Amino acid sequence: MTDPTQRTSEDAAPLHMVDLIRAKRDGEALNARALEFLVQGAASGSIPAEQLAAWLMAAWLRGLTLEETRALTVAMRDSGERFDARALGRTAVDKHSTGGVGDKTSFLVAPLAAACGLVVPMISGRALGHTGGTLDKLEAIPGFRTALSLKEFEAVLARCGASIVSQTPTLVPADRVLYALRDRTATVESPGLICASILSKKLAAGLDALVLDVKTGSGAFLRKREDVAYLAALMVATAEGAGTRTVALLTDMGQPLGHMAGNWLELMECVELLRGAHPAGSEDLRELSLRLAGWMIHLGGKAAVPHEGYEMAAAKLADGSALRVFLEMVAAQGGDISVFDDFEGFHSPGATLVVEAWESGYITEMDTTALGWAVQRLGAGRERAGEPVDAHAGIAFHARRGARVERGQPLATLYATTAAKLAEPLELTRHAIHIAEAAPDTVPLVSRIFQRADAEAYLRDAVR
């Protein structure tokens, strides 16, 4: 039997999926050739789903080494067509978030970086579980097209400097198969598999640099602090090893980001900021977007240090340059920009309910995951792939963590598809917001930053 864990001169010897399953089940590491075989079999359909599922469970239980993670990421990146950004003549940068509630920074950082002379080819996803989806939010704009061919994608980038699209059928097809199986086999929460899934799509977009926004706190996908740090370090080291300059920021998701959560609601909030407004409830969204954009601009070679990139982004936000890029992108992808002339007139939820404070005190905690489920069950998200979403459902938050509230004061407004959808989100929201007599400690917006050297040092010392 060929040992898939060893590199030998018999590189042409046949590989068999059952051997890969057995090796990983027994805690052995697979070489790059074995992982390429697995990935190509997933993409082509030549390996049955039950064997892929068995290998995924073995990988979840035994873990992947750094070398396996890198090899799996590269194999998945190369499993289909790749976008070549070099013809655009500008440095290609992107941002990826691990997901959260009200997490809408893409609509700010993409035009900010593009306004500073970079190109941002952003391939995004849809809502699933308690987190919102960037594509669903954009499709709240009438006519907006997210399913562009790579040729159309390139044309929008050449014209606007930024484009946000869905994954094409030919881009990283292996990930589409493996992610669907992970979702159905309880093998999602594996650092190596998460890393390969995220980075394969990003690296297939031809990026020169990537900024990772890795969430922490009650709304984060991974709750344990050490798991979040390990994933951040792993993604930085893996992407850098594949030739893409990368940094990861660990950011707070202990409350929704900004004061809106929902598809059209989040676009309203972002366009308000792009127009130069400074609403108090959006200050964390504004600050984080500038910090992420600052790193994008720095890694893209337009600023000597991240703070200089921050200042450049702030200037483009203030002078309206980023707004112009955003509106040009929306129009180029078929969206009707006239809807931004009358936010409230376009906003048409089926039912509305105000949640009032049931006692006086300070908001000390928010269960952000529960609030995300409330948003989803109002109609803004989906429980399974392919379900429609409501552009106008969601939650507007009127008080944030640390705020002093009085009994009867509005805490949030729920917007639902129908009145029948309000009851469960109301209970979720009431149980998710904690009010106490004493004010909570301040939580930093960005708690840690991993660059290549930091990531590699962390991984050397990490015990998994």
Image (spheres, helix red, strand yellow):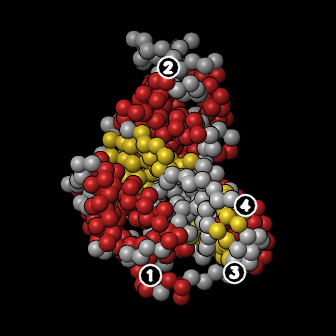
- The label nearer to you, 4 versus 3, is 4
The residue positioned 51% from the left and 17% from the top of the image is 5
- First reached walking from the N terminus: tag 4 or tag 3: 3
The residue positioned 47% from the left and 66% from the top of the image is 283
Label 1 sits on residue: 340
Number of other residues with Cα within 10 Å of mark 3, as a class: few under 14, some 14 to 19, many 20 or more: some
- First reached walking from the N terminus: tag 4 or tag 1: 1
Where, by quadrant of the figure, is residue 387 drawn?
bottom right
Can residue 385 be seen in the rendering of this structure?
no
- The label nearer to you, 1 versus 3, is 3
Label 2 sits on residue: 14
- The label nearer to you, 4 versus 2, is 4
State the separation of the CA atoms marked 4 and 3.
Answer: 27 Å
Near-viewer residue (451 or 19):
451
Residue 340 vs 193, above or below: the answer is: below
The amino acid sitting under disc 4 is: Ala
- First reached walking from the N terminus: tag 2 or tag 1: 2
State the separation of the CA atoms marked 3 and 2.
Answer: 62 Å
The amino acid sitting under disc 1 is: Phe
